[in-house]
Amino acid sequence: MFTIFMYIVAFSFLFLSYFMDKKKTLKALKKAWKSFENILPQFLSILVIIGIMLAVLSPEIISGLIGQKSGWLGMLIASLIGSITLIPGFVAFPLASALLKSGAGFMQIAVFISTLMMVGIVTIPVEIKYFGKKSDNTEK
Amino acid sequence: MKILINRYKYFLVLVAINIVINILFPSVGQKSLDITWANTVDMLSVIPPIFILLGLLDVWVQRETMIKLMGEKSGFLGVFIAFFLGSASAGPLYAAFPVAGVLLQKGSKFTNVLIFIGAWSTTKIPMLLFEASSMGWKFMITRFFINIPGIVLIALITENLLNEKEKKYIYDNTASLN
């Protein structure tokens, strides 16, 4: 739904831009492709890592580690597992709700979700590429 | 060719690992491939408009305009725009970095770019709706309001920890990448 909206917005601007200045529009598209291609190797690596991780760590295994009674230790484990990689929200939330159903604690899941979307050890190379080492470490 | 292999070496190693898993534990390997494929399709369907907008932003928005909107003296407006741009986006966080690079190049304030990244990671509007439907409104709203000060705090701490030399390095770095 929202994706369709993004497409409509992007293509409206693109047509407007083309109408106003063809040369500039072509330059914009070249730039778009270059930026994408620049980051593609990291994109692909992250996708494979997420795939392997989710296949190995089943909801049962994770909720065993971060169950309702796991307390602070469970939250620590949740933040550690969550930090392994950045997982897009549309994967993270169904996973989180599956974990809740299989017995994970709410507090632990809140930590898990936040770190899942914000902190990613695996995605650090991408961040370092753009921001250098120090800003990356402090963001973590 | 050699450069190409070098750039994709981590990806190739990971694919090799997945193949090994596939041979040793076929069911786990297959599951991993399915998940990777589903995510790749998801990513490719979400990402094109982001990069088109990035390209258009780069070509059409003047540096002077960007400085006015998100630069050193943009104040509250800059923070607001940063939150808005980040929240109105779609796609995984790693797609935010190229956009952040362009914003920096155009003269945005460093803190605002960090806020933009923070917002992109946790207060994306489509994601909030999705979160509400799978976790409930109460969970979503609570997390939303707890995360906002967190985003600003992280941005300010990062900004203060970096000295001028390091910031210049980041600016130069994004210039060479974009």
Image: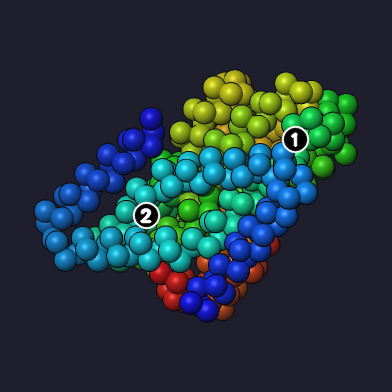
Q: Quadrant of residue A82?
A: top right
- Residue B8 versus residue B26: which sits nearer the camera? B26
As drawn, B132 above or below A33: above
Q: Quick check: B74 left or right of B22?
A: left
Q: Label 2: which residue?
A: B51
Residue B76: image location, x then y, percent: 43, 49
Q: Position of residue B43 (x, y in %)?
A: 47, 46
The image quarter in which residue B39 lies:
top right
**Residue lying at 34% horizontally and 60% vertically, measured from the top left:** A32
For the image shown, how many numbered marks are present on the structure? 2
Tell me the chain of label 1.
Answer: A
Relative to A22, residue A13 above or below: above
Task: Label 1: state its secondary structure.
Answer: loop
Mark 1 is surrounded, within 10 Å at the Cα level, by few (under 14), some (14 to 19) or many (20 or more) other residues, namely some
Q: Mark 1 = which residue?
A: A58
Q: CA distance from mark 2 to mark 1?
A: 34 Å
* Residue shown at the point (32%, 35%) measured from the top left: A5
